[in-house]
Image (cartoon, rainbow, N blue to C red):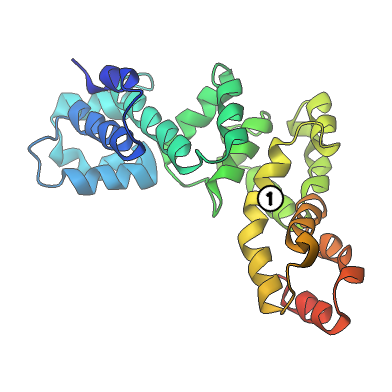
Amino acid sequence: MSLFFSIEKLGHVVDDDVLKLAKNEIIHVLQLEDDESKDEIVHDLMENGRQSLSKYEDDLLPGIYTAAINENDGDFMKSLKYYFEQQWKVQYGSNEWFILFLKKHKDSQNYQCVMNRAAEYGNKYMKNCPILSIVLQLVFEGIDDQCLTELNVFNDLWLTITNDGLKSIEKYSDYVAKDLLDTIIEKKQLVLFQALREYYRPQLFQLLKDSKINNTDNLYEFALDNVAEYGWLTGLQKLQNKIVPKYFKTLLAKTP
């Protein structure tokens, strides 16, 4: 019996076991159990997706390789997609809002497109904050593979939103339904705002510490909310009256 189907039934296993079983399914599908390079091959697939498989053609039986490289709905792609899906759940399982967001979109066509993209390219489009990248790809349905690979739209969106915050997404209204865009900007739908908080938090908190600014009256969370919504410069300006001037100047000087 395929490991893929057995994994689905093991709701009691711990996170590491889930990922190990998912990796083993990839090895099983490619019939690499006895190959000395199996760990290297699987690691490459985890990082770079199916695109990396061509490097290992000589390690696979011809029929297995042909099916894996050509079939978009075959066992190999299913096993890769399952691995990435489980990896996201394990890595971000403490963010309940994200897990609920994935469940909400699981049956949508765009969810399948995002999963196919992950299986095909690995972490290529995950940037330095996968949770934000995943949310953006699911929210902005109009940003398809062509927009990512040829038109640079996703890169532009990423640079804009990671510098100018939530409010800046209006510039990309052509790629998301208007009603959804309005609910996101008005924060009636918080998923993108929460993902931006995850992106900004590590760097912002370190900047505040390096600028000798104390977390008095929950200042760090207040700062995070403002930077996530308005971006670095505008968001930090909203802190000015809460910070000693010389420390505030230091903060601005250190801001990216």
Residue at the image position 83 percent from the left and 46 percent from the top = 167
Where is 246 relative to 89, above or below? below
Image position of 132 (left or right of 56): right
Q: Is residue 144 visible?
A: yes
Q: Quadrant of residue 77?
A: top left
Say if 196 sits above or below 10 in the image: below
Inspect this view and state whether residue 152 appears: no
Q: Hey, which residue is sitting farthest right in the picture? A: 241
What type is the residue that disc 1 sits on? Answer: Arg
Q: Position of residue 1 (x, y in %)?
A: 18, 15
Q: Position of residue 76 (x, y in %)?
A: 29, 26
Residue most toward the bottom? Answer: 246
Residue occupying image coordinates x 81% and y 37%: 187
Which residue extends farthest left?
Answer: 34
Between 15 and 151, the one nearer to me in the picture: 15
Q: Residue at x 32, y 42 (%)?
A: 45
Image point (78%, 25%), residue name: 177
Provide residue 149's location: percent of width, then percent of height. 55, 42
The residue most toward the front is 217
- List x then y, in percent, for residue 178: 83, 27
Question: Can you tell which quarter of the image residue 86 is in?
Answer: top left
Left or right of 153 on screen, residue 50: left
Q: What residue does disc 1 label?
A: 197
Q: 146 or 103, which lies in front?
A: 103
Q: Nearer the viewer, residue 251 or 213?
A: 213
Looking at the rendered structure, the secondary structure element under dot 1 is helix
